[in-house]
Amino acid sequence: FHAFSCQKFMFFQQNGVMMGTNSFSWPGSGWTIHTSRSKIYNNDSHSLQFRSHVVWKRELGLTRFSNQDLPEALWGANRLSLHHEESDTTLYFCALEALRAWALLDEKPIPHLSGEKPDDWDYTFTTTYAGSLRKGKETDLSIQPDGMSLYRSSADNLANGRVKLRQPLCKCVGGRTPCAGIANSIKKEKSILNGDYSLHLLPNDDNSSRQLYYPPPVEKWIPTDEAFDMEELLKTESSPLHYTQPVLFWVQNLDPQSYSSLTGHVLVAKSFTVASIRCFVRVNGVRVRVVDSRFIIRKDRCNEILRERSWKEGTWAEYAGTEAANWIDIGTDREQSNRAANRLRHKVPPVVEKLVLKNRTIQNQSSSVARPTTLWTKNIDGIRANSVKCNGVMIVGLQVDKIIAIDCQTGNVLWGEDLMGVLSLDIGFDNTLLIGDDRGGVHVLYPPCTDIGNQESNQYFSFSKKDGTRERGKFSTQVQSTSLWVEKVSWSENGRHFVAAAGKQIMIDGVRLNNEATVYAVEFLRNDQVAVALYGGLLLVNFVNGVLKVDKKLDIGSAAVLSCAVSLDANSIAIGCLDKRVRVFQRSKKGDDWTARDWVGFSGGVTALSWDSSNEYLAALGGSTLLVARRCITAGEIPVLCCLDVNKNDHNNEIKYESFVWSDTKRGNFLVLAAVHSGSARYLHLFDVNATNDTVLRKSYPIKSIPIEKGDEIVFTNDGNDIILWGKGKGAMVTKIKRVELLP
């Protein structure tokens, strides 16, 4: 270990390879610069080392099917970071987040001169990665795979047709674990590397408030007209440079066809510090591009960061000259990229932004946990709610053989009636109930719902009858097969039409339509059109003059559908699949065609989807992943992850996401989520999806939290200000709490 001036070096060996870290404290500024260099990652396709291409490919979802790969020379542990002590903010650069940005960009491949058509993915690894910002010091945890990579890609159906069981690939009986020892060593290495996450739960004390500590969000980049004069700064600096370090993240050398690299650099002078990250791409004889993100920090304004993002691109002739051969030796990597930056034109106008850092003493760094204000609590003996709905006037809960309605304001029971085998429920705007049962029946009930079987206005429809005719006062008591279980029902927006689904059938206002596959979800697009999500596709069914007609079929490949959501303007449809992806269909401006894109990388099947009231954001829940993305997201734009980080090495603290709902306020979009963690502890968390860090992906942490009972069904009133918690089990409690308690 050597130390001199404000600069420190530390070198050590690991597996016989020399690695080093370097730090420098910029005098009088409060900024500390850290660089770390490590060995090239193992690119053996059979290697099971944690620091290997195999692990990173799995993290990024790269497949052999598409012949996707990583840069041949990858320094995954290299990093460059700048930490500001007063605001506890770190600006850092790493290979993992740059590759995530590359996957989100999904740039089309540049044809090369080899005579062979390149694979349909960007082999040049062009990335618009502009660095990462977060509160707290950046650690090795930030730059290694953590299972949180998601990306938006073209809608490719990797499998089609009916699912068939294949023959075993080996003759093993009962399975085998030839790599168990290696796998355990990987797990141990990863555990040591990652350490603890950032969530700390204080001891449970019902009489006091607690704190869940999360990193606070970072400040926002604001567009500015301020001149970005990096070259002028470097020319006018007369004193010797204090510190300069380059950091290489990857090189993809496919000469004689192409070459690309990603490099970071930092330079510290007496009165300023500049940092940059550059993606350089050269396809010999075809095109050259250079994507830059550059940063300036002035010593007289140490809490301000100025950033310029640019993309320059041009032909080979513009780069090398009109008479140049298809491959020429122009110089070193730095000389080649500088030549491109000086000669090529901007593909898009450069963007200059400013970020002003706040002192850490005025930041809210925790999510408060306190008992909420209870408006009323009722003990509904014997009611176990399988489904609960609320329209602001009444709350309706379904049991296997009973239905009950509660006044939303007082908690008093309005009515309760026996109804056998009820499975699904929806409430119309005039309080009309739509109920599906396990006997192929669809009930339309008009309040007050007493003496259901004999009330003149009530209607009953049947999937089990050949014509689905309406009958009054006659309900089937025979238990039917699961193909007649009515598990999906929905009203149209105007309340004049209903749709129900059972097995492979759908019913609209009593008229049935048989399909080729099981129906998983039904949603109205318009009052006369229904989206029907079934195995392998999405049907758009028109209902005109009592006739059902399939207008269009949209393919999703061989995948089971778990959820479906239609935007309020009916121009976007999101499908959540069992194979851990979301397919979003977007209607063209002409209205006849639909385009499709996929969100890939969820940790489980996507069980819940919802559009916000502004039609701007889509939220998707799959396993332990909750994604929020703009509907009209542009290529390379970074979505938001709602996070509840705990120590992932402790399985007792495993997070289990249950459900979520949008809750809009005048102060912006909020997302409320129910989650289980730390054993039996259960919380309702409030996220502000506009308050995030600036990483890839952006992370939003809870701003408020309240504890709730395990098993409670969560329902929101129509104004979004109150929450209904309906317990499950005998002697269930129904509680109304004030959601305003959650507001910051």
Image: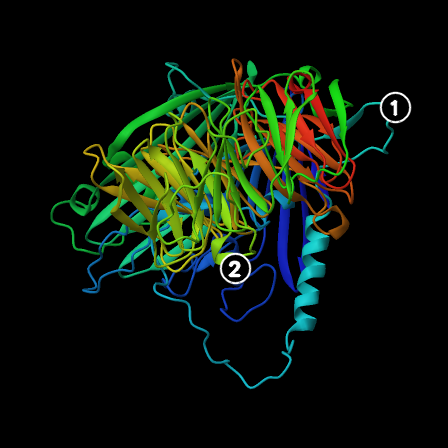
**Would you say residue 214 is visible in this rendering?**
no
Q: Where is residue 312 in the image (x, y as percent from the top left)?
A: 28, 36
Position of 326 compared to 724: left or right?
left
- Relative to 209, say whether 278 is above or below: below
Q: Name which quarter of the figure residue 509 lies in.
A: top left
The one of 422 and 634 positioned closer to us in this rendering:
422
Colour convention of the picture: rainbow
Sequence-earlier tag: 1 or 2? 1
Q: Residue tagged by mark 2? A: 481
Per the image, the residue denoted by label 1 is: 207
Between 68 and 348, the one lying in front of the other is 68
How many neighbours does mark 1 have within 10 angstroms: few (below 14), some (14-19), or many (20 or more)?
few
Quadrant assignment, res 722: top right
Q: Is mark 1 on a helix, strand or loop?
A: loop
Residue 278 position, x and y percent, is 40, 40
**Which residue reaches farthest bottom?**
171
Q: Which residue is drawn at 29% across and 43% down?
A: 541
Element under label 2? loop
Q: Which residue is drawn at 52% across and 57% down?
A: 482
Q: Quadrant of residue 643?
A: top right
Near-viewer residue (375 or 205):
375
Query: Given the image, on which type of amino acid does mark 2 rest?
Result: Ser
Determine the residue positioned at 55% across, 31% down. 661
54 on left or right of 345: right
Q: Residue furthest left?
A: 323
Residue 518 shown left or right of residue 218 in the figure: left
**Amino acid type of the residue tagged 1 in the rendering:** Asn
State left or right for residue 659 relative to residue 735.
left
